Each structure stands twice: as C-alpha cells, then as structure tokens.
C-alpha cells in the first residue's frame, strides 16, 4: 500500500488530506463532514455531471481538481463560467484566497498568473466566460470543466466541446468533460445530462431501524420538531446518520457518472433552514436547496394555457391600449379589458402611429433598439405614448414605475416581475384573446410565447432571482408586445399611474414584494401576484358561455 503523500499525485482526495488543504474561508477540508464529496474528489470519469444545491463546497472541489489535473495529469484545462466577469465573480473571491491559503497550490503555480489564465507546472488552466463566443475558438484543452452550466450560453459551451475533440488526438487518455450546476428547469442543462447518467443518489441508513433511504423533501423532515427524520420509523436522524451515507447508482453500464447533491447531505445545514427556504419561491428552493430541477406550472407558458384564454368574440374596441415591440419589424398587440383583439407586425413606424390614432390608444413601446422614432411619438402624443425600459436587476420593489417631470414619457418595468405577472395572467385566464386558435397560430403568437422560459440565476453578490430567457435564435416579440400592453393597461384603469413603494414601517401595504434569496439560501421575501392582479383588474367577458 502506498502512503498518502505518494497517493496524492494520483488522487485528489489523497492530495487534499496529505497537504491539509483548507477551503477559501480557511476551514480545513475533511471528509468527516464532507463525506458526500469524497467520491467526487476521487472521481476520474471522462464524463461527469453534478446537479447540485448551493453552499455544499463544490466550487472549491472543482478548483482543486483543476490544479491537480493540470499538475499531475499534465492536462490543459478550460474552466468555463457563465459570468461576463470571471474575475469579479470567481477568480478574485474564490481562486485567489484558495491559492493564498494553501502553500501547496501556490507552489504549483507557474510564471503565468493572469486573471483568466493560470499556469500550473508547464500546463495551463484557462478561466473563460461562456458569454464571449470568440474566446472559445482559439484555445484547445484536454479537460473541459463547465461550471454553472444551466446559466451559461449553451452555444458557446458546444463550441468549447469541439475544442476538446481536437485535443483528443493529442491525448486520447484525456478529452474529459465535466459539467456542474445548480439545475434550472426539468430536461435542461445539467438535469438533461443527469438523466443520461448512472444517476447516483445519496443513501443513508437510519441507526434506529437500519433502513436504507434517500433523504427526501418533505418526507425526511418533521415540520413540527424541525428535525430530520427516518422516512420508515419516523424517529429523528442523527447528524452522523445523515453524514455517513453512500452513493448508490440507479443505472449500471452508463458512461456518464452523475451525482445529485442536495443540502440534506451537508451536516452543517439543519432541517430548520430547509423549512425556512421552502417557504419562498419554489424554483429557488428546488434549484438551490434541493439541487433539483423545477418546472412550475404557474411560471411556464404552455400551449394549453394559451388556448384556455381563447375567447373569440366581437370586441367593442373602446379604451384600447397597444404594446409595441421595437425592431426592424415592429410587433404590436392591441387590447382592452375585454381581451386582445388585434395583433400584427409592420416595418413602418407610420403604421404604428396610425394604429394609435385609430383607437386613440395608450401605447407603450420598447425603447430599444431604436429609441429615436419612439421618442418622436412620445413627444407628439404626450401622456398617451410611453417608452419602456426594462429594469433587469430588480432593484426596486415596484413592477411598473412611471417617470415624472421631464421623464414623464418614460416608464420602467421590472423585467422579471412584469413577465411573471403577464404569464401568471395567462395561466389564470386573466388575459383573453378574442381570436380563434388558427388565427393565433397563423401569426406565430403562440410560438413567440413558447420560446420564452424562466430560470433562476445567482448574481456575484449571491442574490438569486428569476430571469426570463428566450431560446437562442428564436423570436419572442409578441410576448413582449403583450407585456408592454399590460403596462399600458395600467393607464386606463384609473390607478393614478404610479405604484408607490411602501413607506418604511408600513410593509403590509407593499404593492409587491421582491423575490430574492441571500447566498446562504435565506429567502428574503416572496412575490404576491394577487396584489398586481388587484391593480390590473380582471378581464370582462362579454358573453357568459365560452367557445
Ligand atoms: Zn428508521
């Protein structure tokens, strides 16, 4: 048998123990409390996928493994992250302190120590953003590590994949790819790859009844006592029970090694914390606490939910609002409280103006990418035509903010929340379409809606929030035109136009509360759709019976 020191060249787990490595916070990495990480540290599969919760020590593992592989396997490693600022989000906060606190890693470093490129021995680790397509082309590597896969640009990731194929000719023993992420929706990103893997889950044994089991939400937690319990005998599980599990495969003979990691496996995270997290946004809870994909019926747009909103009838076309999506081709949606009655597209701003005049409508137009013609319309039809800017970072509590004074033609809408609200309205049939199915299909309205999906993203500051994304290369203009019409609708409902933020100490009157979670997983507040609905009102059906 070889000792730990000699073993450390062959194996990352031995390497960690032999050199008493500490994590970026200076806490020793031991496998007593991180037992579930031992197998991934020892892992040498060519194809590895990890669908994981946050706060379980996985990034540290990935960095240490990259160094180890570069040094002892003599591999060039590409390490991708979704962020546009690798340096700000990853290199500075994680890699620098990790290297600084572990002399063995420091000694491994070669002369090159740029922010995006580190030399280890005579090899390199490239830290690259998945949002810079050009950077994918020039590098080839033996090992490709994709961190935060689900939040990365999938097209760029596939470009990196081709770089790996080239390296295989040089080193047929390598050509590894590893993919890690907090999952997002079912069947996407890491969840999709995990489905093709051997699907390992963490099984523990209850020390009372000796039954093997997977820790599950909500069965493994007693909500009253706020403790982990055995799903069989219902008695309390000890921290040791929870720590001393083992990885069990669902499938044999599959060449992708897959792990699913939840916060249940981390002995330092108690049941109380899990219960707290469960009370917030469900997609955040599933993705970041349970390490599971989550598809909410409330926040996905389905074909079925749209068809349920069909209500072909003659609309009186009074009190009309129009939402316009800006572009070479402008897409518009005309509606009132009885429903959406006209949709279409044009290349001509004159036609948009004509539409506005035809119905004397309130109109909200996307300010970008061509603000000048929009500004002209705003000035010509002051108080009737507005230009919208999406607020992407959700800094304010308001969904819709109408400008004042010389900014009175500008409206800002929280992009995620207004999309959430519009989609929730579709799902609750609070938006009606006065069309037949064929009519909606023919002008691509349904297709545009289905191209949009919601995921949850975590910012550098650890703020987690939902984001709507469009399938790459597909159009979503009509959905946004519908959203702009929802904004415009607020002008016709006698709400005074402005949704005020609550005064300090008057939280109960909050118009809407932001959904976000801290890096430790604490859910700060939930989002109340009903408040918005009260503001926007329910649509009025002109006939009792629906088609
Ligand atoms: Zn038991």
Image (cartoon, helix red, strand yellow):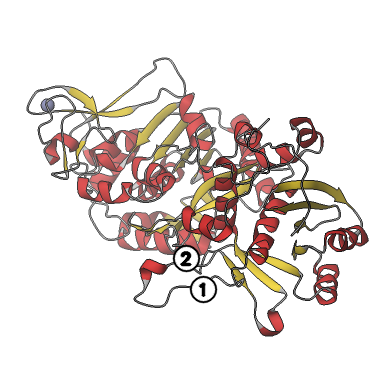
Q: Report helix, strand or loop for mark 2.
A: loop
Q: Nearer the viewer, residue 324 or 471?
A: 324
- Ligand 1 within 8 angstroms of badge 2 C-beta: no
Q: Is residue 209 above or below residue 385?
A: above
Q: Residue at x 41, y 49 (%)?
A: 281
Quadrant assignment, res 311: top right
**Residue 205: x, y in percent?**
16, 27
Q: Are marks 2 and 1 in contact (CB under 8 Å)?
A: yes
Residue at the far bottom in the pictured view: 405
Q: Is residue 377 visible?
A: yes
Quarter of the picture containing the N terminus is: top left
Q: Nearer the viewer, residue 333 or 317?
A: 317
Q: Relative to residue 57, is residue 246 drawn left or right?
A: left
Q: Residues within 10 Å of mark 2 (few under 14, many from 20)?
A: many
Q: Percent from the top left, x then y, of residue 294?
A: 45, 38
Which disc, if any, is residue 284? none
Identify the residue position indicated by label 2 in the image.
Answer: 511
Name the residue rendered at 16%, 30% in the picture. 230
Does residue 42 appear left or right of residue 386 in this picture?
A: left
Q: Which residue is mark 1?
A: 500
How far apart are the two marked residues, 2 and 1, measured between alpha carbons?
Answer: 7 Å
Expressed as whole percent of the image width and height from the top left, the position of residue 247 reads 29, 27
Q: Quadrant of ligand 1?
A: top left
Question: Residue at 58% of width from left, 58% of height from top?
Answer: 536
Q: Is residue 149 left or right of residue 376?
A: left
């Amino acid at each position: 048998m070889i000792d730990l020191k000699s073993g450390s060249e062959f194996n990352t787990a031995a390497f960690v123990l032999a050199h008493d490595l500490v994590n970026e916070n200076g806490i020793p990495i031991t496998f007593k409390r991180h037992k579930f990480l031992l197998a991934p540290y020892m892992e040498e599969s060519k194809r590895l996928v990890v669908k994981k919760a946050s706060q379980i020590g996985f990034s540290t593992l990935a960095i240490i493994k990259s160094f180890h592989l570069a040094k002892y396997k003599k591999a060039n490693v590409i390490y991708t992250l979704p962020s546009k600022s690798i340096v700000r989000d990853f290199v500075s906060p994680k890699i620098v302190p990790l290297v600084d606190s572990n002399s063995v890693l420091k000694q491994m470093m070669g002369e090159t120590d740029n922010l995006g490129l580190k030399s280890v021995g005579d090899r390199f680790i490239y830290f690259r953003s998945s949002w810079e397509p050009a950077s994918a082309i020039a590098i080839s590597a033996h090992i490709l590590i994709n961190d935060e896969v689900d939040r990365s640009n999938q097209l760029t990731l596939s470009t990196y994949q081709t770089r790996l194929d080239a390296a295989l000719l040089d080193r047929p023993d390598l050509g590894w790819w590893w993919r890690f992420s907090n999952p997002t929706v079912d069947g996407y990103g890491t969840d999709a790859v995990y489905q093709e893997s051997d699907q390992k889950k963490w099984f523990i044994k209850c020390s009372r009844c000796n039954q093997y089991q997977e820790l599950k939400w909500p069965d493994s937690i007693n909500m009253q006592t706020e403790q982990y319990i055995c799903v069989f005998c219902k008695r309390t599980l000890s921290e040791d029970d929870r720590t001393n599990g083992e990885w069990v495969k669902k499938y044999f003979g599959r060449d992708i090694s897959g792990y699913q990691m939840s916060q249940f496996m981390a002995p330092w995270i108690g049941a109380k914390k899990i219960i707290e997290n469960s009370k917030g946004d469900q997609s955040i809870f599933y993705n970041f606490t349970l390490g599971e994909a989550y598809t909410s019926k409330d926040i996905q747009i389905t074909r079925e939910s749209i068809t349920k909103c069909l209500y072909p009838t003659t609309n009186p076309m009074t009190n009309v609002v129009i939402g316009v999506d800006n572009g070479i081709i402008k897409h518009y949606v005309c509606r009132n409280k009885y429903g959406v009655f006209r949709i279409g597209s044009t290349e001509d701003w004159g036609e948009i103006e004509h539409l506005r005049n035809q119905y004397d409508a309130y109109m909200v137009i996307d300010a970008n990418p061509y603000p000048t013609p929009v500004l002209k319309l705003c000035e010509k039809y002051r108080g009737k035509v507005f230009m919208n800017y999406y607020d992407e970072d959700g800094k304010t509590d308001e969904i819709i903010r109408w400008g004042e004074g010389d900014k009175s033609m500008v409206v800002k809408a929280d992009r995620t929340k207004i999309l959430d609200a519009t989609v929730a309205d579709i799902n609750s049939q609070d938006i009606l379409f006065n069309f037949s199915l064929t009519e909606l299909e023919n002008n691509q309205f349904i297709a545009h809606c289905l191209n949009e999906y919601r995921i949850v993203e975590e910012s550098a500051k650890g703020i987690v929030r939902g984001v709507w994304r469009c399938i790459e290369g597909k159009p979503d203009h009509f959905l946004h035109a519908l959203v702009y019409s929802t904004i415009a609708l607020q002008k016709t409902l006698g709400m005074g136009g402005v949704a005020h933020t609550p005064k300090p100490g008057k939280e109960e009157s909050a118009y809407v509360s932001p959904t976000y979670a801290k890096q430790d997983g604490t859910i700060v507040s939930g989002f109340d759709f009903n408040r918005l609905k009260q503001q926007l009102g329910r649509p009025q059906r002109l006939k009792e019976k629906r088609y």
